[in-house]
Image (spheres, rainbow, N blue to C red):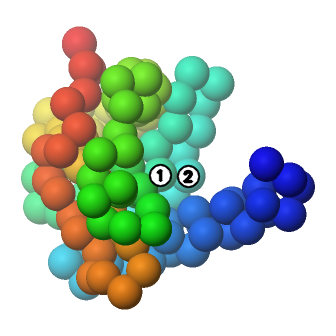
Amino acid sequence: MSARDRAGALAFGLNAETVAALWLRLKFYRILERRYRIREGEIDIIAARGSTIAFVEVKARPTMDEAVISISAQKRRRMSRAAHHWLATHPWAVNRILRGDALFIAPNSLPRHVPAAVELDLG
């Protein structure tokens, strides 16, 4: 992949995260963090609504079908590690409902938010 292709992919991904954050806001979520990263993992968006904290993975692909099947076991492990770290630094959230959500983005389609799509290991 060339430097230009990588830059384009990064821009596409950042744009998708912005769209995802706006979509979640329309669904009355409050965005707590965007692009939360630690060495062992990352979470695209951390959002709250009511008593729920959602750790959201945003997947943007050329088609919705490709987006839906793109969350790997490795991604789930990395999200779990990041969520565990975030919870350790935000103890007020530990007693909330904790969920691993996915938000899928594809051109010419409305975003698709799937609550509890990602099984997180927070133990």
Q: What residue is drawn where x is 88% and y is 55%? A: 3
- Disc 1 is placed on an element classified as strand
Provide residue 57's location: percent of width, then percent of height: 38, 49
Provide residue 13's location: percent of width, then percent of height: 57, 63
Residue situated in front as seen by the camera: 77 or 46: 77
Provide residue 71's location: percent of width, then percent of height: 35, 40
Q: Name the residue under label 1.
A: 44
Image-based side of 37 in relation to 47, left or right: right
Quarter occupied by the C terminus:
top left
Residue situated in front as seen by the camera: 12 or 65: 65
Residue situated in front as seen by the camera: 64 or 18: 64
Q: What residue is drawn where x is 61% and y is 69%? A: 12
Q: Mark 2 points at which residue?
A: 35
Image-based side of 108 in relation to 50, left or right: right
Say whether residue 118 is visible. Answer: yes
- Could you say which disc has been placed on residue 53 in the image? none
Image-based side of 25 in relation to 39, left or right: left
Q: What residue is drawn where x is 35% and y is 24%? A: 73
- Disc 2 is placed on an element classified as strand
**Up-down: is 89 above or below 101?**
above
Please, what is the three-letter code of the amino acid marked with disc 1?
A: Asp
Say whether residue 83 is visible. Answer: no
Please, what is the three-letter code of the amino acid marked with disc 2?
A: Arg
Please identify the residue farthest to the top as the structure is shown. 123
Q: What residue is drawn where x is 78% and y is 61%? A: 5
Label 1, residues with CA under 10 Å away: few <14, some 14-19, many ≥20: many
Please identify the residue farthest to the right as the structure is shown. 3
The answer to which quarter of the image holds residue 110 is: bottom left
